[in-house]
Image (cartoon, rainbow, N blue to C red):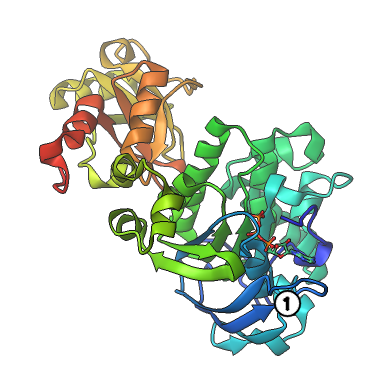
């Protein structure tokens, strides 16, 4: 992957009239992208890196590009925002032929995220996120509000992180800032080139979950290059499997690719574990969530305890003011708290509703808990599932049926 840092003009987003808020009501949602007979011939290379590719990416979908090293994934991705100029063919984004568009303008309409966030080390987190608003000449107040809103959106407390430098953040936090920066001007399209390639497996899983939750809220069109087929299965609405010259060997849902690989090439690529991987296709959202009793920090303990007793629950999920889970608390102990404390259990096992059942089992085993909390948009509590629910879903009789 011939990539190091993103040039300033490639970091993100939308035309100057873009709305300033990211929310399901006002946010810009995805648009379709169509690569029509696109070829890239690099100078001095015997064969085109991308050879007459035709690819339709649907509005609002997350499309994963996978394939062997050097098959042209990154070249295909970068032609969409013209970081690489196609040699021939047409690329249509949101109904508009962008092959003739001013590339700078185009790159502001298309968010771009690379490994480790591609942050500028000499700029604070806030300044990194404010890059595109700066280019679009937003005024100070609007930019500052937007920076805080985006940091919040990607799960970083603005007051804590806004003035830090990238070196003062973990890899996962840097990656979140990279996503915030790419979303700054609310672009309809996000291009992601191995965004989670540089982080450890646990952080990677968390970032994937966060991206799924974020995407549920934002509905962008996301095109992502990954080396990791499991990541493609987990995140992709559809997966494009490419061979040399970016030949599209199969373009379909993860379920369909695993069940019916189009060619021996695909079967080899997805590996012998395909049958097992189908287990990873069942998501938490396929299970009936248990609602449980919830209580908000600050409210009366005895009242919450009484609600739990009435519902027959011996534990209560304590939530913060935004509905995010803080901890599990034994109901009988709550009865002694006049106002329920906002104490956080750092080890509380939580998963996004689009996480897979194998991840749920992993999480429960790691935390030695027999249940896991399921969160949705902005990490808000949705309910929980128990280890028994997960196990019963994994028995052969349950395959194909939803509980
Ligand atoms: N700037 C360049 N000049 C010449 N050849 C290049 C250039 N960039 C990429 N290539 C070649 O084009 C082909 C496709 O490269 P590309 O980076 O798109 O593949 P990829 O599938 O993303 O690879 P990887 O998975 O290893 O990142 C490779 O053979 C590569 O060597």
Residue 134 location (% of width, % of height) = 81, 65
Height in image: 79 above or below 236?
below
Closest to the observer, 154 or 315: 154
Q: Secondary structure at mark 1?
A: loop
Closest to the observer, 290 or 182: 182
Residue 143 location (% of width, % of height) = 74, 60
Residue 174: name its quadrant.
Answer: top right
Residue neighbourhood size for the residue with mark 1, other residues' Cα within 10 Å, grouped as few (<14), some (14–19), many (≥20): some
Residue 135 location (% of width, % of height) = 81, 69
The residue positioned 52% from the left and 64% from the top of the image is 242
The residue positioned 67% from the left and 56% from the top of the image is 113
Which image quarter is the C terminus in?
top left
| Farthest-out residue, right | 122
The residue positioned 54% from the left and 57% from the top of the image is 67
Residue 82 location (% of width, % of height) = 72, 75
| Farthest-out residue, left | 397
Classify mark 1 as within 8 Å of ligand 1 or not, answering yes or no: no
- Disc 1 marks which residue? 41
């Amino acid at each position: 992957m011939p990539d190091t840092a993103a040039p300033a003009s490639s970091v993100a987003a939308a035309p100057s009239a873009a709305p300033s808020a990211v929310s399901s009501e006002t946010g810009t949602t995805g648009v379709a992208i169509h690569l029509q007979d696109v070829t890239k011939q690099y100078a001095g290379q015997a064969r085109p890196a991308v050879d007459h590719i035709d690819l339709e990416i649907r509005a609002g979908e997350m499309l994963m590009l996978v394939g062997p090293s050097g098959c042209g994934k990154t070249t295909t991705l970068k032609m969409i925002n013209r970081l690489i100029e196609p040699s021939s063919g047409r690329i249509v984004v949101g109904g508009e032929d962008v092959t003739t568009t001013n590339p700078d303008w185009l790159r502001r309409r298309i968010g771009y995220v690379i490994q480790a966030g591609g942050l500028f080390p000499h700029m604070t987190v806030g300044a990194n996120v404010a890059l595109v608003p700066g280019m679009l000449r937003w005024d100070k107040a609007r930019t500052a509000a937007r920076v805080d809103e985006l940091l919040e959106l990607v799960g970083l407390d603005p007051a804590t992180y806004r003035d830090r430098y990238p070196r003062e953040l973990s890899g996962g936090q840097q990656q979140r800032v990279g996503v915030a920066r790419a979303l700054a001007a609310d672009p309809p399209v996000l291009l992601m080139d191995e965004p989670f390639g540089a982080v450890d497996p646990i952080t990677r899983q968390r970032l994937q979950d966060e991206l799924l939750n974020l995407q549920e809220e934002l509905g962008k069109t996301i095109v992502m290059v990954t080396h990791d087929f499991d990541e493609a299965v987990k995140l992709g609405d559809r997966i494009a499997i490419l061979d040399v010259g970016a030949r599209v060997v199969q373009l379909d849902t993860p379920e369909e690719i695993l069940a019916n690989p189009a060619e021996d090439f695909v079967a080899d690529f997805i590996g012998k574990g395909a049958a097992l991987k189908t287990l990873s296709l069942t998501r938490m959202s396929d299970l009936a969530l248990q609602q449980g009793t919830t209580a908000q920090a600050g409210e009366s303990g005895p009242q919450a305890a009484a609600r739990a007793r009435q519902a027959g629950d011996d534990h209560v999920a304590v939530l913060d003011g935004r509905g995010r889970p803080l901890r599990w608390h034994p109901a009988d102990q709550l009865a002694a708290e006049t106002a329920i404390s906002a104490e956080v259990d750092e080890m509380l096992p939580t998963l996004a509703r689009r996480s897979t059942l194998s991840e749920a089992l992993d999480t429960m085993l790691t935390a030695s808990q027999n249940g896991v909390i399921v969160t949705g948009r902005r990490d808000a509590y949705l309910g929980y599932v128990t280890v028994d629910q997960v196990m019963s879903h994994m028995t052969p009789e349950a395959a194909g049926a939803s509980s």
